[in-house]
Image (tube, coloured by chain):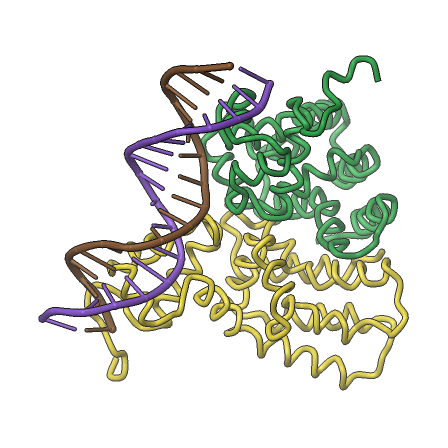
Chain colours: A yellow, B green, C brown, D purple
Amino acid sequence: MASTPESRDGARTKEQILSVALELFITKGFEGTSVRDIADALSITPSALYYHFKGKEEIATSLLEQRRHELDELTDWIKAQPRTADLPRVAAIRWIDHATPAQIQAMRFAGSNRPFMQKLGEKGELLRSGFASVEDALLPPKSSTIERMRIRMLLDTLGSALRAAEGTDATFEEILSAAKSAASSMTI
Amino acid sequence: MASTPESRDGARTKEQILSVALELFITKGFEGTSVRDIADALSITPSALYYHFKGKEEIATSLLEQRRHELDELTDWIKAQPRTADLPRVAAIRWIDHATPAQIQAMRFAGSNRPFMQKLGEKGELLRSGFASVEDALLPPKSSTIERMRIRMLLDTLGSALRAAEGTDATFEEILSAAKSAASSMTI
DNA sequence: GTCTATAGGTTGATAGAC
DNA sequence: GTCTATCAACCTATAGAC
């Protein structure tokens, strides 16, 4: 309790803002969520948000940046492995096994905002398109479109399970389990 | 050529409007696409659109309505089958085998606009949430969350292949093939 | 760190002429 | 059917007081 900066009515820290914004971006979409929506949910005014973030887009990119190192870690791990035919599947399962609730929420965000994610991918090398570096690490130099698709589908198994769980009472564990089974069995 | 109503510069028929709107909704998202964007792409003014449609949302729902009967057909087919354990997979493969480019585009739309689709599902029994009726037809009366997820993931295999094909030069056939392989092998 | 006030732009949609 | 003209509502973002 000691170090929590604020405990009053409205939530205030950057983390609290990000948490509320993430929830709204998932349910209403990035474009469908106004800065006012976020501020209202926090019981503050929009202006207060601009003290913490340069703009609405920076809130979203911060959200993604938080998860960036987990993708980097996976990429590094992949690069350290001997390249076997089954490496993509093993990597996908590793990704699922290491998934945290925070990662799950970020994936929900990405899944709910495909046009926005693509726009980000186009204009920023900094962030790249999320899984792009993982994908590249898994792809042999000269790979076919089919091979790329296979890898993407394997990596997206968790995303599929997430979509399948929408509106149900599926637990975190059930989602991971469903994703893992799918990744384990999937062939192209 | 004879019966095409208009061949001048701007596109005009309802179908042409829907086609242009669909493309924009896929790439920029429903909320990220303004009525002006659509009108501009057609070289007409926004007002002209309101002669054909009551509003922006009706353009989107018309798009989905066009594909409604294909889902109804699948639902009917499922109901006419003996209920075997593998029926969900067989239905998913049938769905993939019968997919047309128009259906693919509609699926892209749905995949790019999850928050919008969910909003529609909440407020309209008329249209229901797309695959909901198919899903219900496949589900035994008392089914577990896991069973529901399995069915959704099977039905969403085509959607997964579509996402995996984004930005690649994958052909229509390659996408269907990838989806089919995944549906054929997937277990939960 | 949050507020009030407000700027400047865009949005979805309508009225009415042609 | 499409246009011009226009609207009220909403948007993101800023300036400056507290």
Is B10 in front, or is B34?
B10
Residue B93 located left or right of residue B125 = right
Front in this rendered view, residue B103 or B131: B103
Q: Is residue B176 left or right of residue A15?
A: right
Relative to B174, does residue B54 appear above or below in the rendering?
A: above
In this picture, is C3 found above or below B114? below
Q: How many marks?
A: 0
Relative to B101, is A118 on the left or the right?
A: left
Q: Nearer the viewer, residue B131 or D8?
A: D8
Which is nearer the eye, A55 or A147?
Answer: A55
The residue located at (76%, 51%) in the rendering is: B161
- Estimate the x, y position of residue B179 in percent, counting from the top left: 80, 48
Q: Quadrant of the N terminus of chain B?
A: top right
Q: Is residue A16 visible?
A: yes
Asked which quadrant contains residue A49, the reply is: bottom left
- Residue A70, quarter of the rendered image: bottom right
Vertical arrangement, residue A179 with respect to residue B73, above or below: below
Residue B140 appears in the rendering: no
x and y percentages locating residue B97 in the rendered image: 84, 36
Classify B173 as above or below A138: above
Report the residue at 74% width, 49% height from top.
Answer: B162
Residue A54 in picture, x, y percent from top left: 40, 69
Task: Residue at 29% x, 59% y: name it.
Answer: A46
